[in-house]
Structure formats: structure tokens, C-alpha cells
């Protein structure tokens, strides 16, 4: 996740391949993607606290977005993980959502040492720029965990 | 006020596992290392020059709020160390209290003059005991000499307990994180093992 979080051109390239529909939020711009990756698990952009459900959605959502970018640009194969994650993100079962955070994170971290394919953006990391560009696109769902 | 309440030094014991394996997301390691306040009249610890982020009280407009803040200190040379929190919990006499995140933002812990707001809660009644837990979000991001990478923050959370009166001194508890002493591991794969003081 850290790579996409700090490399603006890579994030732009991922979004250029199409919006990322996570169910509870759609990432339609680089600002959306960076905003999710730089977002806080405990609060929304305006400082409102995330509910348990919203926190679970956020935590799996950012890993799922990362996995989708890894598939799109790195050619990685997550198997059914992304489909499973999107199915969980469409519901309100925090148990199901949280159960997938680990596996999706593990998939993403397994690519930390993977070589970049030809043509992949190789600009240096710009963490502060990326942080400033991001605008957390999530908002309170109004829902609660079930279960 | 010229005195600062200082909690005991906390050297986190390394109990590290991958954050991603947690059913609870980024707050997997629930190791508990509470610190007990040692002296309510301990002298102030050295802090940043200029406007002191510890000794400066919270604004008079927030007398009913108690703030939790984090200040990075003893920066070993990072140009930036960007971090957020994955979990904050406050219990007053064992009961969880509601937190407010107004004004909270991504922290750059290399800024020695900024004690970053983490959360606030209603100022507890005198005589009560406050227990605070803060888990940094994983990963934090470091930048140094044009290079950048991740700082593994999956270690045990920061935890401390203090009487309500200490929060009332200046309206806050400032977690002063000694960066040089807290960042271990190789340069390419650094790990945060929180080494800190809590100042009031």
C-alpha cells in the first residue's frame, strides 16, 4: 500500500485504467485514491469519528483498492480475493469485512519486492505531495455492524 | 506554570507481527504496557525551542476538553515522517469515553515544534483515573535525502494511565516520541518500537 500511497504518477496510472468501485465509495480520481490511502482509520476528512462499520469498510477498502491497482498495473493475480473483498464491502458484516483485511494485505505485501513491468511509472516517491493531493472520499454510511 | 508532569519512560518491548494478519485490521498487537506516573512535580523535559508544544496550554476556549497529542523528538535525520493513528481509546475509571477528532490531521513527526492533536475528550472529573491507548496506523511513511519508504508501526500500542488532575494542568497529555530511540531495524525496513515520555 505504501508504494501507491507515495507515488503520484502510479496512482494516476491506476485511476486512468478506470474508476474503482468499492461499493461504499467509488474512487474516480487520483485525489480519491490518494485520499483513501492517506485517510485515517479513526476519522473522516472533517474529523467525524468512523463507526465500527465505517472503520472496517475503510480498512478493507484501502487494501482492496491497492490490490486492484496491483492487478491493473503490476499484472498481479489476486485470485478471488478482490471479488471476495468487494462482496464483503457490499454488506454490513464487520466480521466478514475484517476477516478479509489480513488476506488482502498479505497479498499486497507479497508484491513488495516484485519487479516493475515495462512502462511502469518510476518516478521517485513524493509522500508529502501525495498526502496533500489526497482528499478522503469516504463519508458516514449511517449503518452499523451486522454482525 | 513551570512544571510538567512526566510519566515514566516507556520502552516498548518488541512483540511484532504483521498488521495485516489481524482480524481487527491494523491494531493487531494488543500488548499492554501501561506506565504509571511517578511524580506530579517532575521537572519539564527538554522540548522544542520557540513556542513550547508541551508547556503551552490548550486554548482557553476549550476548558472542558482534554487533548491527547503526539510530538516527535530527537529526529535522527528524516526529512519527513508522516503518520496517522489507527486506534485511539480512552477509559475514565474503566469506562470508555467518546472521542472527538476535530482538527486532527496527518502528523509529520519530524516537526519538533508541533505536538499533533490525536483526539480530545471531555475533561474527566478530579479524582478519576484516565487510561489512554494509541496505535499508530501502519505503515507510517518516511522521507530522507530524496528516498522514501515505510515504517512498520505494527508493534504494541502506546498506553498510559494518569490521574485526571494531570490532564487539567494544561488541558493535555503530550506523548513525546523519541524517534532516534524508537526506530529500529534496517534502514530499508525500519520498525517503530515506541520509546516515549508522556508530559502534561
Image (tube, rainbow, N blue to C red):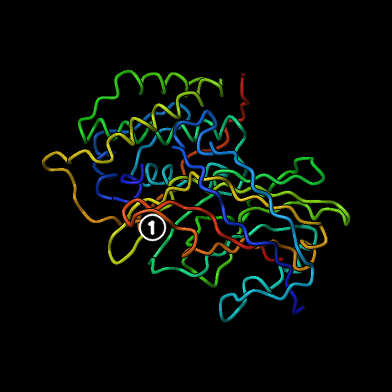
| Residue sitting at x 61%, y 24% | A145
| Residue sitting at x 46%, y 65% | B180
Residue B98 vs residue B88: left or right? right
| Residue sitting at x 71%, y 46% | B90
Q: For label 1, count other residues whose C-alpha is less than 10 Å away and answer few (under 14), some (14-19) or many (20+).
A: many
Task: Find numbered disc 1 in the image and state the secondary structure of the residue it sits on.
Answer: strand
According to the picture, the residue beneath numbered tag 1 turns out to be B142
Name which quarter of the figure residue A68 lies in: top left
Q: Measured from the top left, where is residue B35 in percent x and y? A: 69, 54
Q: Measured from the top left, where is residue B47 in percent x and y? A: 59, 75
Q: Nearer the viewer, residue B129 or A49?
A: B129
Residue B114 vs residue A14: left or right? right
Q: Measured from the top left, where is residue A59 in percent x and y? A: 48, 35
Q: Measured from the top left, where is residue A85 in percent x and y? A: 41, 23
- Above or below: residue A20 compared with residue B59: above
- Above or below: residue B23 compared with residue B185: above
Q: Looking at this rendering, what residue extends furthest in the bottom direction?
A: B50
Q: Nearer the viewer, residue A103 or B60?
A: A103
Subunit of label 1: B
Residue B125 vs residue B150: left or right? right
Q: Nearer the viewer, residue B12 or B51?
A: B12
Amino acid at each position: 500500500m505504501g508504494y501507491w500511497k507515495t507515488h503520484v504518477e502510479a496512482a494516476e496510472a491506476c485511476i486512468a485504467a478506470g474508476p474503482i468501485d468499492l461499493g461504499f465509495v467509488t474512487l474516480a480520481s487520483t485525489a480519491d485514491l490518494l485520499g483513501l490511502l492517506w485517510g485515517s482509520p479513526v476519522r473522516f476528512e472533517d474529523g467525524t469519528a468512523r463507526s465500527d462499520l465505517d472503520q472496517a469498510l475503510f480498512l478493507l477498502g484501502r487494501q482492496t483498492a491497492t490490490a486492484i491497482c496491483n492487478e491493473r498495473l503490476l499484472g498481479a493475480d489476486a485470485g478471488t480475493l478482490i471479488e471476495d473483498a468487494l462482496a464483503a464491502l457490499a454488506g454490513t458484516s464487520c466480521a466478514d469485512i475484517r476477516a478479509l483485511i489480513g488476506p488482502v494485505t498479505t497479498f499486497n505485501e507479497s508484491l513488495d519486492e516484485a519487479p516493475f513491468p515495462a512502462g511502469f511509472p518510476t518516478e521517485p516517491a513524493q509522500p508529502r505531495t501525495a498526502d496533500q493531493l489526497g482528499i478522503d472520499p469516504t463519508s458516514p454510511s449511517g449503518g452499523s455492524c451486522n454482525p | 506554570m513551570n512544571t510538567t508532569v512526566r510519566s515514566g519512560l516507556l520502552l516498548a518491548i518488541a512483540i511484532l507481527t504483521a498488521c495485516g494478519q489481524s482480524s481487527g485490521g491494523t491494531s493487531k498487537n494488543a500488548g499492554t504496557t501501561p506506565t504509571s506516573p511517578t511524580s506530579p512535580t517532575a521537572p519539564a523535559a527538554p522540548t522544542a525551542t520557540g513556542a513550547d508544544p508541551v508547556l503551552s496550554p490548550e486554548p482557553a476556549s476549550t476548558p472542558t476538553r482534554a487533548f491527547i497529542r503526539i510530538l516527535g523528538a530527537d529526529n535522527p535525520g528524516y526529512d519527513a515522517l508522516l503518520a496517522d493513528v489507527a486506534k485511539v481509546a480512552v477509559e475514565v475509571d474503566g469506562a470508555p469515553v467518546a472521542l472527538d477528532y476535530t482538527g486532527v490531521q496527518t502528523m509529520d513527526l519530524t516537526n519538533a515544534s508541533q505536538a499533533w492533536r490525536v483526539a480530545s475528550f471531555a475533561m474527566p472529573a478530579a479524582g478519576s483515573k484516565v487510561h489512554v491507548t494509541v496505535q499508530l496506523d501502519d505503515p507510517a511513511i518516511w522521507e530522507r535525502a530524496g528516498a522514501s519508504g515505510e515504517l512498520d508501526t505494527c508493534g504494541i500500542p502506546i498506553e498510559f494511565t494518569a490521574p485526571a488532575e494531570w490532564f487539567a494542568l494544561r488541558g493535555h497529555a503530550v506523548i513525546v516520541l523519541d524517534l532516534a530511540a524508537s526506530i529500529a531495524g534496517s534502514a530499508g525496513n525500519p520498525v517503530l518500537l515506541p520509546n516515549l515520555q508522556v508530559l502534561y
